[in-house]
Image (spheres, helix red, strand yellow):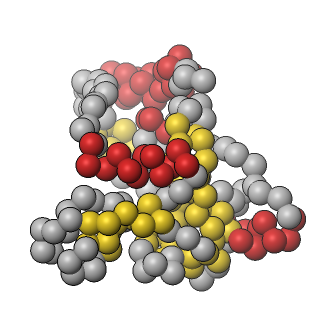
Amino acid sequence: MPLDRSKIEEMLRPYLAAMEEEKGRTGLPLLRDEKSGDPLYFGQRELRLRYLIPVKSLKEFFDGLARGEVLYTRCENCGLKYFPPQPTCSRCGKGTAWLRISGEGELLTFTKVYSKPASFLHYDDYIVGVARFPEQVSVLALIKARDVTEIRMGARVRLVVERREPENYYTYALIPVEATEHTGQTLPED
């Protein structure tokens, strides 16, 4: 299901209208941040960005997602580990091997995102966190929880592959283990 651009445009209309009103009143492209009251510069030129990035050397990562696995890389020479993965080691320049992140990790930190970039406006507010896994790699990902009260630092989390809607592509997310142990069910998709 493709992303409905008209819904995004509809969500942006109030911001654009408020900007035009404020610009007419003050003559400046500034708005006040709703939370802090600080001035925000409102860019007057729309930037739409689509890009193609060559990922031949990282295709194994995407193939892993299609198989339901999240992969990292480890230098075959010095052992340095990378997530997100990279094809060569930054330390010694040698090649890396592809390995699977497995098991449960420990949630190191998290935050709820209320102020989203325009490309995420079609999502409800969401929680992101960093977890450390037994392979000694840290992963930044969305956390599948209804509310921040359901999670805590130090909690056990599982790394799962899911299909993100409405964009319809595979990505990964963190699921608190306690939430699935108590109910026996996974949390609903956003």
Q: Position of residue 7 (x, y in %)?
A: 56, 22
Residue extending furthest toward the top: 6
Q: Position of residue 175 (x, y in %)?
A: 66, 63
Residue sitting at 26 percent across and 49 percent down? 57
Q: Is residue 75 visible?
A: yes
* Front position in the image: 119 or 80: 80
Residue extending furthest toward the right: 183
Q: Quadrant of the N terminus?
A: top right
Q: Position of residue 51 (x, y in %)?
A: 28, 30
Residue sitting at 58 percent across and 63 percent down? 159
Residue sitting at 15 percent across and 74 percent down? 91
Q: Quadrant of the C terminus?
A: top right
Residue sitting at 44 percent across and 35 percent down? 118
- Quarter of the image where one finds residue 185: bottom right
Left or right position of 176 against 56: right
* Front position in the image: 13 or 110: 110
Q: Is residue 109 visible?
A: no
* Front position in the image: 69 or 180: 69
* Front position in the image: 145 or 106: 106
* Residue 41 drawn above or below residue 166: below
